[in-house]
Image (cartoon, helix red, strand yellow):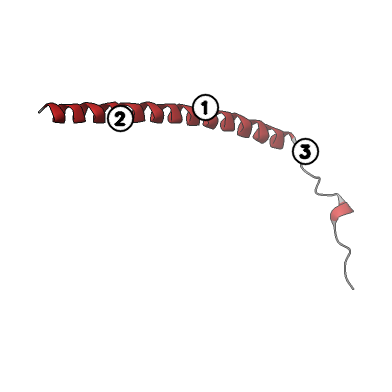
Amino acid sequence: MSERLNDLEARITLMDDMLDALNRTVYAQQQQIASLQQQLRHVYQQMQSLTPPEAGDGGQELPPHY
């Protein structure tokens, strides 16, 4: 009976350590996601501030072929 109890205590200790490691990993990933979301918002704002090319600009049109 004592051996089974020791085995269960060892398993609980191992699972507790694994749970702590998983919690640290999840927290780090949440921090990374928040950072990436902030960077994405910044890039999106920069893209929105760019002025679109004017439709009447003939510099990019190809000459007609005869």
> Type of residue at label 2?
Leu
Give residue 22's quadrant in the image. top left
Give residue 44's quadrant in the image. top right
Helix, strand, or loop for circle 3? loop
Residue 13 picture location, percent across and down:
28, 26
Helix, strand, or loop for circle 1? helix
> Type of residue at label 3?
Thr
Numbered badge on residue 31: 1
Task: Give the label, 2 or 1, closer to the camera.
Answer: 2
Helix, strand, or loop for circle 2? helix
Report how many numbered discs are placed on residues in the image: 3
Residues marked 3 and 2 touching at CB (< 8 Å):
no
Q: Which residue is mark 3?
A: 51
Numbered badge on residue 14: 2
Residue 50 picture location, percent across and down:
75, 37
Task: Give the label, 1 or 3, closer to the camera.
Answer: 1
Residue at point 15%, 27% (across, down): 5
Q: Decide: few, some or many residues near mark 3? Use Cα within 10 Å; few <14, some 14-19, many ≥20.
A: few
Q: Who comes first in sequence, dot 2 or dot 1? A: 2
Most distant residue in the bottom direction: 66
Q: Who comes first in sequence, dot 3 or dot 2? A: 2
